[in-house]
Amino acid sequence: MKTHIEAGSEAHKTLFCQQFMDTHLDYDPDTLPWPELAEKDLARLRSVPFWQEVYHTERRAGAIVAAFTPQVADPVVHAAMALQGFEEHRHAELIRVMIERYGIDATAQPLEKLPDDLETAFIDFGFGECLDSFLGFGAFKSARQSEFLPESLFGIFDKLMFEETRHIVFFINYMAWREKRRGLGRVRRAVKSLRFYGRAGNRLKGMVKRGQDANDGKDFAVTEASVFLQGFSFRRFVEDCYRENARRMSAFDPGLMQPRLLPAIAGLALRGMRAWDAARPWRRAKPAAS
């Protein structure tokens, strides 16, 4: 049964920070059970065109959270955010280990200078993580079901997916706590979220374009893509994003807030597609006007 907790309250702060600390995973990327990959699996892994962007994004995420954390005055929130900074850095280390172990063509590029407004940079990053992860839930499920790579490797990636889900829950609750303490009502918070999601969408499009431009799509062969995309449909992808988001979020205390905008948009889109499917037989059977 869901317990109502007022956003911005001490109870709310204690709950979202404590759950974040309690669900921390203890592991070292270097000692994870990295599998030996067959040549065809190595070729698929190396052909994914976005590893350079993923590595850079994870490194930048760690830098942003680490730089912003000293500005957080509340000691409880500060401790939780410091842990997130550690985990973001560990994500980058995990990607680095994978790159080096499997000979992926990606290197550490110089990080851009962080903006003076670190709080806005952190909020931008947080909404971007919400968008990336919601879409990533569906893509991860599709790739896993298609056996694009061995299950043992997906088991390692699943650690990242779990931690990304934790980060999202922490961020959404942090923002609700922060905005409520600053006197922002629900409507103003929703408008602000839409603005930041829009910015995140533009950054995601830029990342996809850079990933495509890096190799002009030549390394991601049609045969490899067909394994990943076999049976792909837009509706199924939206369903996977929607259901996987709900499944992963169900692991957290129901008293905590969760992202609502993207699941609501996906749910509305699915209802529209189902209504369209239901109407099509009627449209086909409708007699032509004389």
Image (spheres, rainbow, N blue to C red):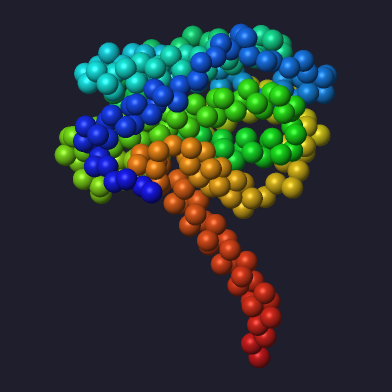
Outermost residue toward the left in this view: 183
The residue positioned 66% from the left and 91% from the top of the image is: 290
Tell me where residue 214 sits by quadrant. Answer: top right
Q: Toward the viewer: 192 or 112?
A: 192
Q: Toward the viewer: 47 or 253?
A: 253
Residue 116 is situated, as x and y percent measured from the top left of the image, at 28, 16
| Vertical relation: 163 (above or below) 67 | below
The residue positioned 57% from the left and 37% from the top of the image is: 137
Residue 263 is situated, as x and y percent measured from the top left of the image, at 46, 48
Outermost residue toward the front in this view: 1
Tell me where residue 20 sits by quadrant. Answer: top left
The residue positioned 64% from the left and 78% from the top of the image is: 282
* Residue 114 visible from this viewpoint: no
Outermost residue toward the bottom in this view: 290
As drawn, is 219 to the left or to the right of 17? right
Residue 275 is situated, as x and y percent measured from the top left of the image, at 56, 67
Q: Toward the viewer: 282 or 87?
A: 87
| Vertical relation: 163 (above or below) 69 | below
